[in-house]
Image (cartoon, rainbow, N blue to C red):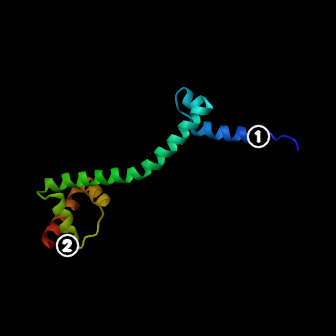
Amino acid sequence: MPRVRKGSARRKAKKRLFREARGNRGGRGKLLRTVKETVVRSRAYAYRDRRTKKRVFRRLWITRLNAACRQRGVRYSEFIHQLQSAGIELDRKTLSEIAISDPQVFDEIVAAAASAA
């Protein structure tokens, strides 16, 4: 049986790796061994950071809400508790967007939550 060489399949695999490593400096974008290492690490970081991104955004929304609440004389934790007892089911993302884009509506939400609690 004749020996089979990888040929076009190897070229295709290398092209895929080099395409994924585009934009890296030096050997990280030009040398096969370092490109493989770079691609493996970049996939690991991408997997990890897809989860981290959710945490980071939630922290940002909470920080914004805390600042908006404090301007109105309410602590963030009290505000969230008042919302729950008032039965207002808005998530933190929506609340922070309202606080930034439409402060009058946010004032009404704070007042409604405070009156119900």
In the image, taking residue 31 as reference, residue 112 lies left or right, namely left
Snapshot quadrant of residue 10: top right
- 58 versus 43 height, above or below: below
Snapshot quadrant of residue 72: bottom left
Q: Is residue 75 visible?
A: yes
Question: Residue 92 placed where, x, y %?
Answer: 29, 60
Give the class, few, some or many, for how many residues have Cα within 10 Å of label 1's Cα (few <14, many ≥20).
few
For the point 30% across and 63% down, the residue is 91
Q: Is residue 107 visible?
A: no
Quarter of the image with the C terminus in it: bottom left
Q: Which residue is mark 2?
A: 85
Amino acid type, residue under disc 2 in the picture: Ser
Residue closest to the far top: 26
Closer mark to the observer between disc 1 and disc 2:
1
Amino acid type, residue under disc 1 in the picture: Lys
Q: Which residue is mark 1?
A: 6
Sooner in the amino-acid sequence: mark 1 or mark 2: 1
Residue closest to the far right: 1
Looking at the image, which is closer to me, 30 or 61?
A: 30
For the point 18% across and 61% down, the residue is 77
Q: Describe the element under mark 2 as helix, strand or loop.
A: helix
Looking at the image, which is closer to me, 71 or 57?
A: 57
Looking at the image, which is closer to me, 48 or 71?
A: 48
Residue closest to the far front: 1
Question: Residue 86 placed where, x, y %?
Answer: 20, 73
